[in-house]
Image: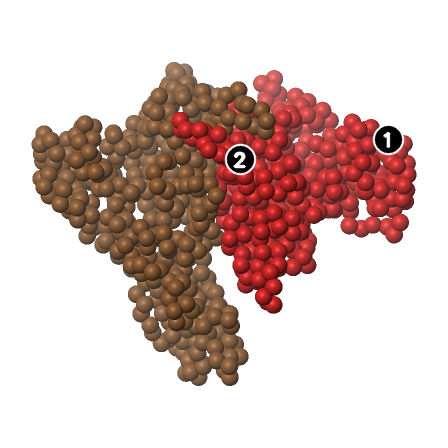
Chain colours: A brown, B red
Amino acid sequence: MPKEKQVGITVKKENFSEWYAQIIQKADLADYSAVSGCIIFKPDAYAIWEKISQEVDKRLKKMEVKNSYFPLFIPEKLLKKEQKHVEGFSPEVAWVTQAGDSKLDERLAVRPTSETIMYDSYSKWIRSWKDLPLKLNQWNNVVRWEFKHPVPFLRTREFLWNEGHTAFATKKEAEKEIDDIIIMYKEVMEKYLALYGIVGRKTDKEKFAGAEYTVSIEFLMPSGKAIQGPDAHHDGQNFAKAFDISFLDQNEKRQYVWQNTWAITTRMIGVMIAIHGDDKGLILPPKIATTQVVIVPILFKDTKEKVLKKAKEIEKSLKGYNVKIDDREDYSAGWKFNEWEMKGIPVRVEIGPKDVEKKQAVVVRRDTNEKEFVKLKELNKKIGSLLDEIQNELYKKAKKFLQGNIIKANSWKDFEKGIKNKKLVLAPFCGEGECEDLIKDETNGVSSRCIPFEQPKKAGKCVKCGKEGKYLVYFGKAY
Amino acid sequence: MPKEKQVGITVKKENFSEWYAQIIQKADLADYSAVSGCIIFKPDAYAIWEKISQEVDKRLKKMEVKNSYFPLFIPEKLLKKEQKHVEGFSPEVAWVTQAGDSKLDERLAVRPTSETIMYDSYSKWIRSWKDLPLKLNQWNNVVRWEFKHPVPFLRTREFLWNEGHTAFATKKEAEKEIDDIIIMYKEVMEKYLALYGIVGRKTDKEKFAGAEYTVSIEFLMPSGKAIQGPDAHHDGQNFAKAFDISFLDQNEKRQYVWQNTWAITTRMIGVMIAIHGDDKGLILPPKIATTQVVIVPILFKDTKEKVLKKAKEIEKSLKGYNVKIDDREDYSAGWKFNEWEMKGIPVRVEIGPKDVEKKQAVVVRRDTNEKEFVKLKELNKKIGSLLDEIQNELYKKAKKFLQGNIIKANSWKDFEKGIKNKKLVLAPFCGEGECEDLIKDETNGVSSRCIPFEQPKKAGKCVKCGKEGKYLVYFGKAY
C-alpha cells in the first residue's frame, strides 16, 4: 500500500533533525505559522501542555503559590532597571512602538520574562514582614526573538510557560523553596512525561541573567545534544536592590527581600517527543495521553455489525481509561494502525470476527509492538497493568539512555572524544568563565550543562587548563 | 475604631464609579500597572477567572471543541485580508516594529483577536468534508489599545478570554452551534456567577466586525449602564471567502465553509463585582468563592487555647466546603470581620468562649448580614444549605434588578425619560443604521443593546423615526 507508506515518517530516528521535523507535522502536533519562528500548537500538543500545567499547578497550589496575571508589556525603563538582566534579554526583545495610528512615547517590551514588571509592583505591595512570603505565579506567553534556526517546541520565538516569582524575608527560606520547586518539577517530569534528567547548578556563565545561581534539570536529546528543562533561579537580593523591594522586619529594621524565579516551558513537549518517539512516530506516556487506548474493529461486509457492536461493548467495559473507538469505514484497518501508531496512542485493541467468536481481542503495545491475545473478561485488568508497565518502561528506558550516554573524562583528549561520540561528558573543571569560553571556542559550541550536587572530595585537575578543579561538571553540545 | 473604618469603602455604592475604584483595590482584586490601561490581576481576581474558565472549558470539551494555541503576532498583510474586520480593529492595534536592534520588514499586530492568523491555517488544513467541522478554541491574552478611560476588568487594553473559531460544512450546523454556545455561556453566568443577562441579536451597526450577525448576553450595571457579556458571531462565509477556506463536499464540489467565533472575557469579573457588591465590599457567589467559609475564633487571653482548638475542630468538620480559619493574633475580631466582608466571603462562622460552652457557633451570611446561632452538630448541614441559598438569592436579586429596570417606550419622550432614569429601554425600532446614529447623537451615546428573540407580531412605530418598526430592541447607555 504505497499511499499508507507515504503518511509515515520517511527517515529513521537516527537522522534526528529530519525525523523530528516530520513527526511534528505527521503526528499533527504543530504547524508553522505566517510569523517566522512562531508555531501553532495543534490540539494534540496543546493537550500535553494542559496535562503538564495541571500537574504543576496542582502542586503549586499545595505549596501556597497563588496564580495572578501581569501585563504583557513592560515599559523600557523598567526592563532596564537590573543591569545583568537587561543585558541578557534586550537583544531578543520584541518592541511595541505604535498603537493604532499613534507613536508611543515610550517603547514597550513584549515580556521576555516578567521580573521587571512584577517587581515594580512588589516594591509597592511589600511593606512589612507580615506581607512575606509573597509567592505569585503566572501561566502565560513570552516572546524572545531568537535569531537562531527555530525548531517547534524546542526553540520558538513565542512560547508558553509558568513563571513563579517569590519573595522571602530570609535567604534560607528562599533557598529551601528552590529545592522544593526543582523536586516538584522533577516529579512531574518523571511521573507524567516519563523523562529522566540531571539536576544540578549552572555555572556562573550559564546562569540566568540577574540570578545569584540557577538550578536546572538537564536532558539529553537522541541527537546527543543537551537541553535545559525546568529551572529555578535564586536571585539573592539583586532585583530587590534594583527595584527597592524592602520590608520592616519584626525588629522594625528595614531589610531587602530574597527572591526566586522558576519556570517550566512548552519546550518539554518537544523533549518528550524527541526522547520517546521511534521510527513509526510518537510514543505517549499513558499518564499524559488524552487517548490511552484506541479500539480498531476489523470490519468485513458480513460481520461488520457484530464486530462493531462488540467493539462498543469493549469501549464501555474499559471504564477509567481514556478510550477511543475508530469506526471509520473509509479507511482500512492497516491505515488506522499506522495513524494511531504515528500519534503514539499507548495501547491498541484490535477486534475482528474471529475474535468475537473466541471472546478475545488483540492487544498491541505501542512502545514495544508486542501483540497479545487477551480474553475479553480479562481485558480491563490487562489494560490497567499494561498502561502502568508502559509508563514505567518508558521512564526506565529514558533513564538508561541518559545514564548510558555519560562518560567521565579526565583528559582533554577523552573530553573531545566523548563530545565527538555525542556523550554528556562529566569532567573536572576549574570554574573560571574564561576557561569555559575556551572550551566553547575549541569545540564548536560545547557548554557546561550543570554542576551535579553530589561531588567527590577532590575533583581532580581541570580538564582544560590543568589547574585544580573546583568540581565535576557536565558538558555537552547545547541544543 | 477609626483605623478599621479607614480600610473600608468610604463611599456608598450609589456613587458607583468611586465605589468600584475602591472595591477593586480594597478587596485586593487588581492593581494598576506601569503600563497605562493594563492592570494586574491579583490572586483573588485571577481565581475567579480560573473558575469561569474551568467551567466553560469543561463544557467546550463536551462539545468536542479542542484547545490549541496560535501566535500572539499577526503579520499586517493577514490582518488586512477581511475588509470590515480590519476597519473594526486597526484603530486599536498595538504594533511590534522592532526585535532586538533590528527593524522588522513587516509590522506585526499584537492580536486583538485571532481570526486572521487562524484562518490562514484553516485554509491550509481544510481540504475535504472529512476535515469538518473544525472546532478550535484558545485561552489567551489579547490587546486592544482603547483610548477611552480604562476601568479594571471592564475596559482594559489587555484582557484574557477564550476565543472559539469553528468551521462547518453547512450554515445550519454553524447556526446551531451559535445557539449551543450562548446557552452554555448563559448557564455558566447563571449557575456560577449568579448573573442574569438578556440574550438577543445585535443590530447590524453593533455586530462584530466581519460577522453576519452577533448574538450576545447583555447585562445592566448598577450605574444604569448596559454592558456586553459573552458573545457568539456567525460569520457566514465572509472570512471563508477572504481567506479561501474551502472544501470538496461529498459530491466532489468545492464549497466555502461556514464559520463562527465566540468569546467570554475577564470583563465578567468586573460585571460580577459590580452587580453583587454592596457598601461593605465584595459579595462572592459561593460557587466561585475560593474561600466559602471563614472561621473567626474570638480570642481572649484565658480562653484562647480552648477556643482555637474548637475552631480547628469546626474547620475539620466542614468537609466538602472551602474553609479558612483566621487565627491571626495581631488583628482584632472586628478588624477580621471587616476584612472578610470586604473580600466577600459568603459565610462567616464566629466562635467565642461562651459558644464553646454552649456547643454552638454564630453564623453570619455575607449577602444579608443575617446572624444565627447554630448548634455545632448541625453546622455542616446548615452551611451547605446556606451556601445554596446565598447562591440562589444572589441570582434572584440580580435577575430582579435587571428586570425591574426595563421600561417599555413607545414614544420618544418615554424613551428619553427611561434613559434619564437609568433604565434599559425596550422600544420599537425601524432597524436602520442612520436612525440608530441619530438616537446615539441625540442622547449622548445611547446604543442598541440587542434584539430579543421573543418578538410580538407587530412591533409598532419606530420610536425615533416613526416608520414601521421591524422589531422591539433594547437600548441603553453603554458602559
**SS for callout 1:** helix
| Relative depth, front residue between B448 and B258 | B258
Q: Quadrant of the C terminus of chain A?
A: top left
Asked whether residue A117 appears in the rendered view, the answer is yes
Going by the numbered disc 2, the residue's amino acid type is Ala
Residue A240, position as x, y percentages in the image: 38, 22
**Image-based side of B198 in relation to B411, left or right:** left
Could you confirm whether marks 2 and 1 are on the same chain? yes
Going by the numbered disc 1, the residue's amino acid type is Lys
* Residue under label 1: B417
**SS for callout 2:** strand
Task: Please say if B337 is above or below A286.
Answer: above
Asked whether residue B406 appears in the rendered view, the answer is no
**The residue marked by circle 2 belongs to what chain?**
B
Name the residue: 48% across, 43% down: A34
Q: Tell which circle, 2 or 1, labels the residue nearer the N-terminal end.
A: 2
* Residue under label 2: B109
Residue A120, position as x, y percentages in the image: 46, 23
**Residue neighbourhood size for the residue with mark 2, other residues' Cα within 10 Å, grouped as few (<14), some (14–19), many (≥20):** many
Q: Quadrant of the N terminus of chain A?
A: bottom left
**Image-based side of B181 in relation to A13, left or right:** right
Residue A377, position as x, y percentages in the image: 42, 76
Residue A119, position as x, y percentages in the image: 44, 25
Name the residue: 39% across, 46% down: A152
